[in-house]
Image (cartoon, grey):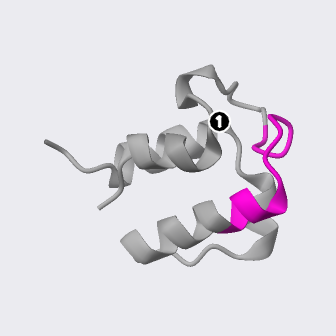
Amino acid sequence: MISKTEIEKIIQFKIKDIKDDETLLQIGLDSIKLVELAGYIENNTDLVIYEDLIYEMNGKWIREFLSKYEKKN
């Protein structure tokens, strides 16, 4: 299952602080962190994250993803 806390650890940024249209590249993530995030998502969901999607991920995408996949306590 996906955890918002784990994603924030990977990207080293609070998701609430990312603007909807701000990509993860724009907040300063490098390609290594993006691949690490994609691996985490792929290992914990049925999604396959292709390279072009990695570079397009933005605040809106992350929040929508979490609303669908985040572990509910």
Above or below, comparing residue 53 to residue 68 in the picture: below
Name which residue type carries label 1.
Gly
Provide residue 20's location: percent of width, then percent of height. Answer: 68, 29
The residue under the point 81% across, 69% down is: 52
Provide residue 25's location: percent of width, then percent of height. Answer: 84, 46
Nearest the viewer among 26 and 58 is 26
Provide residue 63's location: percent of width, then percent of height. Answer: 51, 38
Q: Does the magenta portion include 9?
A: no
Would you say residue 14 is visible in this rendering? Answer: yes
Would you say residue 45 is visible in this rendering? Answer: no
Query: Crowding at label 1, few (<14), some or many (≥20) Cα neighbours within 10 Å?
Result: many
Above or below, comparing residue 14 to residue 38 in the picture: above
Q: Residue furthest left?
A: 73
Nearest the viewer among 28 and 69 is 28
The residue under the point 13% across, 42% down is: 73
Residue 52 as seen in the image, left or right of residue 7: right
Q: Point out the stretch of residues depicted in magenta.
A: 23-35
| Picture quadrant where residue 61 is located | top right
